[in-house]
Image (cartoon, rainbow, N blue to C red):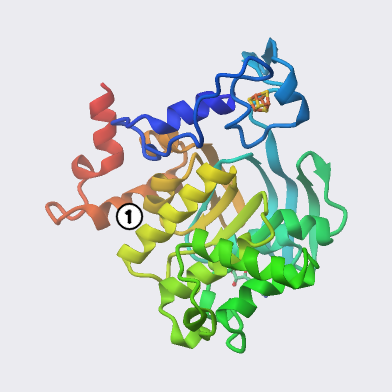
Amino acid sequence: PAHPYTRGLVRSYPAICRAKDLQGIPGMMSHGLAGCPFHDRCTQRIEICKTEVPLLEEVRGRLVACHRGGIVPLLEVRELSVSFGSYPALSGVDLTLYEGETLAVVGESGSGKTTLSKAIMGLCQEESGEIFLEGERVEKRDASFYSRVQMVFQNPKESVSHRMTVLDAVLEPLNVMRRGSPEERVARAKQVLRQAELPVNDRFLAKYPHQLSGGEVQRVAIARALALRPKLLIADEPTSALDPSVQAKILKLLLNLQERMGLGILLVTHDIAVARKVSDRIVVLLKGRIVEEGATDEILIGAGHPYTQTLIESASERLDPGEGGGSLELAPARSRIEIKI
Ligand SMILES: Nc1ncnc2c1ncn2[C@@H]1O[C@H](COP(=O)(O)OP(=O)(O)O)[C@@H](O)[C@H]1O
Ligand code: SF4
Ligand SMILES: [Mg+2]
């Protein structure tokens, strides 16, 4: 889909062959006559959307009625390379993440996923290439960049300081960026903790990370990352340290936030089964290079690169109850081909 409303409809429908569905569209249908009929519910609206009806125009070979030419790119990475000494951890990586979508970066351990996340955040020392955020080239990572892009790190227990209480951890980005008065900052911290489905009573706010469960610390890390209302969240293996029931809750939470706020999510995972459930598109990383990129359904149904197929097969083996030890007849990706035929 090229139009945000079409994407909302596609995502809402329960489809037998699709992975990420039942997500919904925020808000209610507007009955106003002015402006774009979708503007009340659109997460990428601009001023003109409220007042002028967009005309149906050709955009990249499609007809789309949208003042912004359809769903807009949020993050563009061009020819990004990172080396550690003589070791090329990332080589010429190109990717585009659109407003309000989840792009999964999938690859085995050591393929460069964390390096990619950190390089986008400006946390790698030697990088080359270009990064564009909302169409503008990122020259330096300043306050404006970090208010729009935030990251949840691979290990929440290490990324949330053990000397900070829950409230302090979530207040910190608001204090650093001097957002509002002290009272407004506390109100925002509580609001974002509630969005992350955490309690906001004094007892919980005064807890330290070691007094919380793994799932709770991860929610605090997510609340902290969302406090500044970023447009893009980079989540590096946000659930790999959690048990499956907590993983499910955290992934659903991210999808809900995406639906309500139009949050773009770069989801880093070694697990293609997780990517299948929550991503719109997938890029596959192997030894620091992208070897495949495409819509999640297309990649899961017919992976073009043998490495992607290996990732799918190893995830399928985990799901396979045993017969034939990962036989492809039982693998979800292949059975979906049969359904299609
Ligand atoms: N700070 C570093 N110094 C040297 N090598 C590193 C550093 N960080 C990562 N690497 C190497 O870069 C490669 C990619 O690492 P990483 O991005 O952490 O992979 P992933 O997150 O996919 O597991 C690995 O071979 C790793 O050993
Ligand atoms: S960006 Fe504006 S014109 Fe395009 S769908 Fe959203 S509200 Fe409508
Ligand atoms: Mg990693």
Which residue reaches farthest left?
Answer: 323
Q: Nearer the viewer, residue 158 or 95?
A: 158
Q: Position of residue 141 (x, y in %)?
A: 82, 60
Q: Residues within 10 Å of mark 1 (few under 14, many from 20)?
A: some
Q: Determine the residue positioned at 37% across, 37% down.
A: 22
Q: Quadrant of residue 99?
A: top right
Residue topped by disc 1:
314
Q: Answer with left or right where residue 70 lies relative to residue 258.
A: right
Which residue reaches farthest right?
Answer: 139
Query: Where's the C terminus, which quadrant?
Result: top left
Total number of numbered discs in the rendering:
1
Residue 120's place in the image compared with 279, above or below, is below
Q: Position of residue 92 (x, y in %)?
A: 71, 49
Q: Nearer the viewer, residue 45 or 252?
A: 45
Q: Is mark 1 within 8 Å of ligand 1?
A: no
Q: Position of residue 48 (x, y in %)?
A: 77, 24
Q: Answer with left or right where residue 100 lies relative to residue 80.
A: left
Q: Answer with left or right where residue 323 lies relative to residue 180.
A: left
Residue 89's place in the image compared with 170, above or below, is above
Residue 282 seen in the figure: no
Q: Determine the residue positioned at 63% across, 66% down.
A: 187
Q: Position of residue 65 (x, y in %)?
A: 65, 15
Q: Nearer the viewer, residue 199 or 216?
A: 199
Which residue reaches farthest front?
Answer: 183
Residue 3 seen in the figure: yes
Q: Determine the residue positioned at 53% across, 74% down.
A: 156
Looking at the picture, which amino acid does disc 1 mark?
Ser
SS type, badge 1: helix
Q: Quadrant of ligand 2?
A: top right
